[in-house]
Image (tube, rainbow, N blue to C red):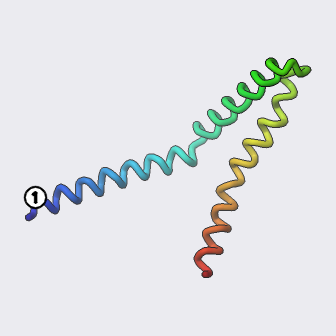
Amino acid sequence: MLSRIEKRLDVIEQRNRRVELDKAWETSLSRKLLITLLTYFTVVLFFFVAELPKPFVNSIVPTVGFVLSTLSLSYFRKLWGKYLVKK
């Protein structure tokens, strides 16, 4: 009986470590920089394929827009959470 409880507790602790790691990744500067770089290079590539002018410069605006929208999601998530708590 005690062994079974210990195993269940170990499973819960492992899950908690995974969840904490996921939370840390979601808010990390590394993730934000990676999203920014991947977005920028994707837009640059699209601009090259579409033969649009100045792909390196013109890719900045959509990248900044996308990054700002993703960074602001946490703010709106908090508002959404407060709204649900009131119900």
Q: Residue at x 44, y 46 (%)?
A: 21
Residue at the extreme right:
53
Q: Position of residue 52 (x, y in %)?
A: 89, 21
* Residue found at x 77% / y 36%: 63
Q: Is residue 20 above or below residue 57?
A: below
What residue do we see at 42% from left, 52% from top?
A: 19
- Say what amino acid the circle numbered 1 marks: Ser
Say above or below: 59 vs 26.
above
Where is mark 1, residue-wise? Answer: 3
- Looking at the image, the residue that sits furthest to the left is 1
Residue 11 x/y as whole percent: 26, 54
Task: Judge by depth and name the residue closer to the eye, 17 or 54.
Answer: 54
User: Percent position (x, y) of residue 38?
Assistant: 66, 30
Q: Quadrant of residue 59?
A: top right
Secondary structure beneath disc 1? helix
Question: Is 71 left or right of 27, judged from the image as shown?
Answer: right
